[in-house]
Image: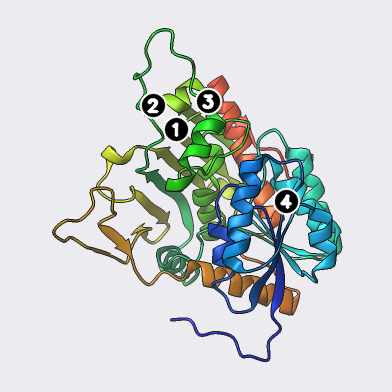
Amino acid sequence: MSQPDAPSRPVFPCAVLSVVKHAYVARGVFSHPRFRPVVVADDPHVPEWTHERNQKFADECQVPYVRDINKALTEYGAQVAVVSTEAERHCEMSLRAVQAGLNIVQDKPITTENAIESCQKLVRAVESSRRKFLLWNRNFLPAVQQAHALIQAGEIGKPTAIHIDFYFSKDAGPPKGSSRPGDSPLNWQEYLIAAHVTSGDGGLGKLPMGELEIEGIYPLAYMHRLIGLPVRRVFARTTAHFHQLYADNQVDDLATVTLEMENGVLGTLCLGRIGAASHPDIGEIKLHVLGTKGALVMSEARPEVAVYYRGQPPAEFRNRRVAIDNDYQLMDNFAHAIDTDGETILDARAGLEIVRVVTAALQSGRTGKPVDVLPVFS
């Protein structure tokens, strides 16, 4: 188990800029002893239910909640901003924080398909100010770390191809085909507001987002970590296969993507929210890497234990991950980047690169044709 840093290391005061989506990022930040909350904030004009969620988290942290972002950034001594707004507000909020001189930890995705220019402004601001930016990710999960170590050690030779299955077995309302003639389409935001209690609101926002846009960051971040090569072209198939909510809002809950990388390396990705009935565990999440000397296959969930007992609630997960220290290690990496003026494991530029890939894949899914991935700045 990781040990806390020495007491002599500075502790970073943090401003939490909204927890409207959910508070898992902020809780992950504060799992590390070098980060402490000093204020929770949001803009005054957001809906009252947003203020209620923010106030609840502020009470949990025993810090003030202020309906004034600028005040939170300038009057509480914060050195780090933790951003977990709706996805369409991510870049705007992070940009305001970095312009105020703060380092940033931001929930994924870094931005939406429709806000690339805002993301470019954010990347320029982060890099010109030499502030540190961490996009929340899962790259410190044990299986990913072990895969990285084996590849770096040359155990499979030079990687030539990578495939990732990223299916997670969560429901999103009634199944596709359950609506009757004359039924109104399911309202995206209303459904996700209601799904908050089950943490099923990852795509919360006014604009509907498919799973490729919401969750694609995780497997693409694995590829960035394990292969580290730019993606030049993609071909994708996307559909709403499982859930009426996604069909009504014309976004994907299932996608396949082929990626042509630099140096002739190929990547493939299968991703989807496949529904609770589709898998006995959290889902099928597996990494396959082919190399010139061999191959590796790893289950992202391992190590895990299965727990069964009399009277167990039907919705309780039987399979539970163990030895997981991802949140702590992400924040240890972030603290080290601040201390040493070093790099984070997934910075703003890498986040924008991933969004470029996702945007090209979404376009390919709509047109049925391969699409070139644009450079970060074009």
Q: CB of mark 1 within 8 Å of CB of mark 3?
A: no
- Of discs 2 and 4, which sits in the foreground? 4
Q: Helix or strand or loop: what does disc 1 sit on?
A: loop
Query: Pointer 4: what residue?
Result: 42
**Residue at the spot of label 3:** 187
> Which residue lies at the image location 33% right of the left edge and 50% below the top edge?
282
Circle 1 residues within 10 Å: few <14, some 14–19, many ≥20: many
Image-based side of 125 in relation to 201, left or right: right
Which mark's residue is nearer the viewer, 1 or 3? 3
Where is residue 347 drawn, in percent x and y? 68, 59
State the image coordinates of residue 13 (x, y, percent, origin top left). Answer: 72, 73
Q: CA distance from mark 1 to mark 3?
A: 16 Å
Within 10 angstroms of label 4, few (less than 14), some, or many (20 or more) residues?
Answer: many
In the image, 181: left or right of 121?
A: left
Q: Residue at x 36, y 37 (%)?
A: 274
Residue 351 visible from this viewpoint: yes
User: Any mark on residue 141, and which?
Assistant: none
Q: Are marks 1 and 2 in contact (CB under 8 Å)?
A: yes
Of tags 3 and 2, which is closer to the observer?
3
Marking on residue 241: 2
Q: Amino acid at mark 4?
A: Asp
Q: Which residue is mark 1?
A: 253
- The answer to which quarter of the image holds residue 167 is top left
Which amino acid does the dot numbered 1 rest on? Asp
Among the two numbered marks 3 and 2 on one chain, the one whose residue lies closer to the N terminus: 3
Judge by depth and name the residue closer to the eye, 180 or 159.
180
Please tell me which residue lies in front, 177 or 130: 177
